[in-house]
Image (spheres, grey):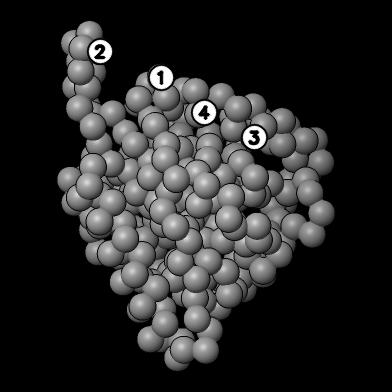
């Protein structure tokens, strides 16, 4: 199962996912996370023209949730983190991503944790994610699995995010990054389009349905809503 990037903060109580780091490092990461979540929305606005809509849809979710988004920018995890500040968030990622220059350090400071490489450790990892969701935290996944910068289409989804939502009995909150043209003086300096992050309405699992059927329904429902929003851009 391919998943992307994890943000976690381990200074609060009842933290499920832990990292083997000393108290001083936790305190430093806590401070860096607070600073990052304050500055990143401004940075993303100035650098990428990021605008956000649908924040009321997040306000309706008080407990755990799984957020999903198309994976089209190196810093899209920071864009999601910037609108989910009321939740402690986790972004599962490959260990190699945490070692990338700048971006890897940024995700790590936000609380990134790696997906285990050994199959023997993967079941325990999934159980920790489920427990974390039940605790009331958030997990963000990129169901497309891999990054394709400024991809003009919505790519096929994998089932990981929808499986977590069903098993933990928490809602999915779909998000979609769309593009808009750069006009005026800024078009002289920027060739890439500006970004807009649309936060869509939560989609709730029906745990009375057969597991495999409901996971597929959640996938199709979220993808349909994201596709509609993508085409409205």
Residue 17, located in which quarter of the rendered image?
bottom right
Mark 1 to mark 4: distance in Å?
A: 10 Å
Judged from the image, the secondary structure of the residue bearing numbered disc 1 is helix
Q: Nearer the viewer, residue 160 or 199?
A: 199
Mark 1 to mark 3: distance in Å?
A: 20 Å
Of labels 1 and 4, earlier in sequence is 4
State the residue at coordinates (39%, 73%).
218
Q: Which residue is mark 2?
A: 186
Mark 2 to mark 3: distance in Å?
A: 30 Å
Mark 4, Cα crowd under 10 Å, few <14 / some 14-19 / many 20+, is some
As drawn, 60 above or below 124: above
As drawn, 42 above or below 207: above
Of labels 1 and 3, earlier in sequence is 3
Classify the position of the C terminus by image quarter.
top left
Residue 40, position as x, y percentages in the image: 52, 28
State the residue at coordinates (20%, 18%).
183
Q: Which residue is mark 3?
A: 33
Q: Nearer the viewer, residue 232 or 107?
A: 232
Q: Which residue is mark 4?
A: 40
Q: Which mark is residue 46?
A: 1
Of labels 2 and 3, earlier in sequence is 3
Q: Nearer the viewer, residue 27 or 173?
A: 173
Mark 2 to mark 4: distance in Å?
A: 20 Å
Callout 2–callout 3 Cβ contact below 8 Å: no
Residue 115, position as x, y percentages in the image: 51, 60
């Amino acid at each position: 199962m391919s998943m992307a990037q994890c943000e976690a903060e381990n200074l609060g109580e009842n933290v499920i996912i832990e990292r083997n780091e000393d108290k001083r490092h936790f305190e430093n990461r806590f401070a860096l996370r607070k600073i990052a979540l304050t500055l990143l929305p401004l940075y993303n606005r100035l650098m990428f023209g990021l605008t956000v809509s649908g924040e009321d849809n997040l306000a309706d979710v008080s407990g755990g949730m799984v957020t999903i988004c198309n994976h089209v920018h190196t810093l899209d995890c920071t864009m999601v983190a910037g609108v989910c500040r009321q939740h402690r968030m986790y972004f599962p990622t490959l260990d190699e991503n945490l070692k990338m220059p700048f971006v890897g350090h940024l995700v790590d400071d936000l609380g990134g944790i790696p997906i285990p490489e050994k199959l023997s450790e993967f079941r325990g990892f999934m159980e920790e994610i489920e427990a974390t969701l039940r605790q009331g935290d958030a997990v963000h996944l990129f169901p497309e699995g891999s990054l394709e910068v400024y991809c003009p289409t919505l790519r096929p989804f994998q089932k990981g995010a929808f499986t977590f939502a069903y098993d933990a009995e928490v809602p999915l909150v779909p998000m979609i990054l769309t593009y808009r043209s750069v006009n005026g003086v800024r078009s002289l300096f920027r060739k890439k389009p500006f970004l807009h992050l649309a936060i869509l309405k939560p989609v709730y699992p029906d745990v009375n349905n057969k597991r495999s059927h409901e996971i597929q329904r959640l996938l199709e429902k979220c993808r349909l809503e994201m596709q509609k929003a993508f085409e409205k851009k």
